[in-house]
Image: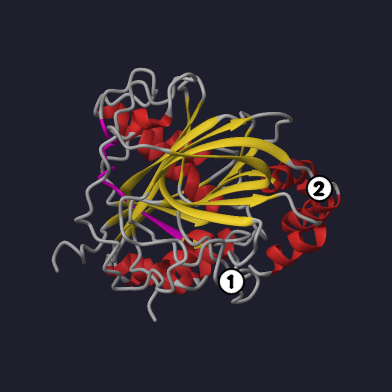
Amino acid sequence: MQKRFTRPQNLLIFVNPYGGRHKAQFIYNTTVEPIFNLANIKQTVVVTEYRNHAKQYVETEDISNYDGIIAVGGDGMFNEIANGILLRTQRENEIPVQASSCNTPCYKTPKYKLGVIPAGSTDCMSYVSQGINDPETSALHIVVGDNHPLDMCSIYDDSGSFIRFSFSMTSYGYYGNVLRKSERLRSLGPSRYDFAGVQTFLNKHVYSSEIQFLPSSTKSQATDIRKCRFPCEICTNDIKPPTITTSVAFDSAAPISSISGGDIPDVVRGNFIMVNSAMMSCACARSPQGLSPSAHLADGNMDLILVSDCSRANFIKYMLSHVGKADRFDFPFVEVHRVKAFKHKSLNTESCWNTDGELIDSPNISVWVHTGLITLYARGVEE
């Protein structure tokens, strides 16, 4: 009990005034700060001024006096902080992140807890870990010191160069193209995703790919009815990360079985509208069940969702299934696998990747999961 409820005394807080609907500063001033003051929590506030400001800060500045780091913003701000603190932790412990030289089976978990106050466009992290996008609820979880492990995945290009860590969705094809188009429409605010989505749908593209993946070694499946709910028997701190030998895992000529210590990978080739991996359900207010409703926060797996070529009518039916409670896997052109790693190779015209709202231009990547690499100020979704 003592370990679970360690209340923070001193927090480093990043406020993103530009994200979402530009309400982060107002939310902090009117909701978050008064609650933290009542709890006698010391606060150092940094208002971000440019992209990756928070990432650079946690990587380089002295943060030794803080118990935790809080993002008042959206998923992009949380992603910045998570990447910054993970890279700093590996550097301080002399753990290389480049796959070509990495001899350690896993990365070290930072000593700092991370929290998020929803103030973005989608706020997937808050919704999935708490079941609601409510700044007051998020602040109270932080005050009482709730904590929950969170899986992260690491992404490398085909030469073994580290690209980034990701906590949510990594998607090739449709969602990658939507992000690329939306970057040119930033002046429209959150509605830019709707415009970019319609344009991308009308200009449907199909991509030929080869995907190697290592199936999950757990009994749970992506099609399970049971969801990740507090207290979740699957998401525990006792889960051991899979043994991963990364020294030759991402050589362009090496099979993905190199990362598994002998596991035999499955291989799928086909023509896909999109290739998705979901580290969590990716639920949000617009899609309450998410991309993969039964995905867990900390089970050492991700759900690999392959959407093959189909008519526009069938594709829009698939997309609309995410809005309600319909089974988004009950389509003949959709297959889903619970995996611990995968490797993607483009076989013809190339698209790009959308990972947590960040663009990756390299089509050929390898991705693997690290169990409970981050600790969140959260409890998990309660029934």
Residue 5: x, y in percent? 21, 66
Mark 2 lies on residue: 204
In terms of image quadrants, where is residue 345? top right
Residue 305 lies left or right of residue 62; in this view the side is: right
In terms of image quadrants, where is residue 235? bottom left
Q: Is residue 240 magenta?
A: no
Report the coloring of the rendering: secondary structure
Residue 75 lies left or right of residue 313; in this view the side is: left
Name the residue at 67% across, 60% down: 21
Residue 164: x, y in percent? 48, 35
Instruction: Inspect the image, locate mark 2, and give the three-letter code of the amino acid beneath it.
Output: Lys
Would you place residue 231 above or below residue 192 in this image? below
- Span shown in magenta: 105-116
Q: Residue furthest bottom?
A: 383
Q: Is residue 112 magenta?
A: yes
Residue 297 lies left or right of residue 286; in this view the side is: left
